[in-house]
Amino acid sequence: MPLFPLRTVLFPGGQLALRIFEPRYLDMVRECARQDSGFGICLILQGRETGAPAIPAAVGTIARITDFHTGGDGLLTIVVEGGARFRVDRTRARSDGLLRGSVAMWPPEPRKEVPVEFALLQSIAERLVETMTPQSRHAPRSMYDDAGWVGFRLAELLPLDVEEQQHMLELTDPLQRLAELRDVLPRFQKS
């Protein structure tokens, strides 16, 4: 699978706009469009988004292109949506610098209802989605009862650093993710 290391984390169900200008990534987008396939987004552990291939985190998210356009600057912008998570077993860099990874797909998280002790997190998620992610604004009300969906939305919208976001991505229990997010909330309260 082609890998796109970034200084951001894509969560399942999340959306991300990417400006594509390096030839290796333009080729990757063409390949994905031709094959109707996705690519993997992984957090950069070492290196940069441009230039030499970066070292990606071992856990990432499949990105499927949902929209694209060319901006006024002539650069291609794509919008991707996060799908399943995966673990990278090994990587290799092509001659053009594009990373490809042998990956093992993770099964989807089991749907768990949000327990009553996390009701505040549901309210916070609803407010954050309403103001910060217009594309999710019309999510069915039932999504706010899904602990996995609420946890992923909070992990992407709260001002966590990327290492914390990566940790949230790697958790496999949606209730543990909610508990850890609840525990970091006091950091974001105004004094």
Image (cartoon, grey):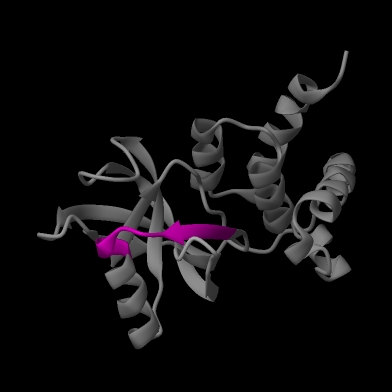
Q: What residue do we see at 31% from left, 59% from top?
A: 3
The picture places residue 88, in percent across and down from the top left corner, at 29, 54
Instruction: Inspect the magenta stretch and tell me whether residue 22 lies in it.
Output: yes
| In the image: residue 47, left or right of residue 121 | left
Q: Is residue 150 left or right of residue 169?
A: right
State the image coordinates of residue 74 (x, y, percent, origin top left).
45, 66
Give the position of the C terminus as an image quadrant. Answer: top right
Q: Position of residue 140 (x, y in %)?
A: 84, 71
> Where residue 125 sits in the image (x, y, percent)?
81, 48
Residue 104 falls in image quadrant: bottom left
**Number of marks in picture:** 0
Q: Which of 29 and 108 lies nearest the eye of the viewer? A: 29
Q: Residue at x 44, y 41 (%)?
A: 7
Where residue 21 sits, quadrant-wise, is bottom left
Residue at the location (64% across, 40% down)?
176
In this picture, which residue range is highlighted in magenta?
16-25
Quadrant where the N terminus sits is bottom left
Please say if 67 is above or below 151.
below
Is 176 inside the magenta-drawn segment? no
